[in-house]
Image (cartoon, rainbow, N blue to C red):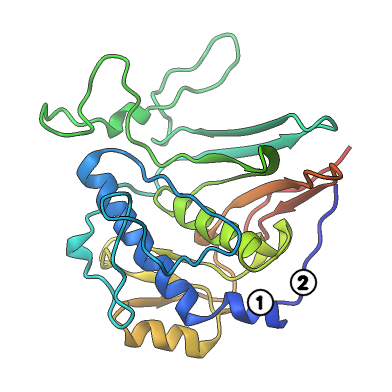
Amino acid sequence: MRSSMRDPRSPLGSRRSSTSTWWAATGHHQGDLSRRTRTGVPPVIHLRCGSDVRQPREPGVGCVRVNRERALPWDKVPSYGSLAGDTVYVAAVDAEGNAASLIFSLYGVFGSCVTSAETGVTLQNRGAYFSLDPKHPNRLEPGKVPLHTLIASLAFKDEKLWAVLGCMGADGQPQIHLQTYIAMVDFGQDIQQALAGPRWLSGRFGLGEARDTLHIEARFPRQTIDELERRGHPVDRWGDWNELAGHAHGITRDPRTGLLAGGFDPRSDGAAIGF
């Protein structure tokens, strides 16, 4: 397994940092959150090489009409969830290409406050996401999995394993996945470059913040951040690196050669290890 990092000042990095790229991405994220809240069903995202994220999908299928000049008002895209709780993500790929993408999250500080006597693992309380309103799409029902923010992804090219990716971060998880896959699919970055690149997250992280706050790391070009703010985003300018923008880890596998490449998020204490 290998890990490498490209100079973020390279032309490849600058295209990834453009206003148009992330203006479209933040808009689509807002629309997907709106659909998730209204239907209780997480959005399905299809990425393909050379795809233009600025082109909306067909209406009604996780689609939002992104206005190129003004940010979407957050009262039109309700969101729920918080960063409370603890999440661990592990990715593994063996020499034969068998892969595991594992995420475990307590949600509450001590989860359900029940510990397995056999394993010592504290059980989660994701069931708290259920609604007791019988008319709500996320209502409590027998055998039903609650709406949640957990994502442990596997990506394939030509029906062969290509990437294993996961992260923590409540409603930040789909945003981190989106940015990482865009970096690899559309900008040709490797897994380490994609994870180490500057990142933004849309949403509220603390009391008193607006729900439509756009948190963004300072490694994006100043003109990109200024333009996003001009278009209507309440911008929280983070420093160069912010732990709230992570943590993400992943492995890619060349479907042709089987070469493995591991990447870890510099914002956290994870690691990419080969043995």
**Amino acid type for the residue under numbered disc 2:** Arg
- Location of residue 208 (image quadrant): bottom left
Q: Is residue 16 above or below residue 138?
A: below
Outermost top residue: 118
Task: Find out whether the residues at labels 1 and 2 contact each other: C-beta distance under 8 Å.
Answer: yes
Q: Position of residue 133 (x, y in %)?
A: 12, 30
Q: Secondary structure at mark 2?
A: loop
Q: Secondary structure at mark 1?
A: helix
Q: Is residue 65 above or below residue 98?
A: below
The residue at which mark 2 appears reads as 6
Q: Indicate left or right for 44 with 58 as reference.
A: right
Q: Nearer the viewer, residue 265 or 33?
A: 33
Return the disc, 1 or 2, that comes first in the chain's sequence.
2
Q: Quadrant of the C terminus?
A: top right
The residue at which mark 1 appears reads as 13
Q: Residue at x 31, y 38 (%)?
A: 41
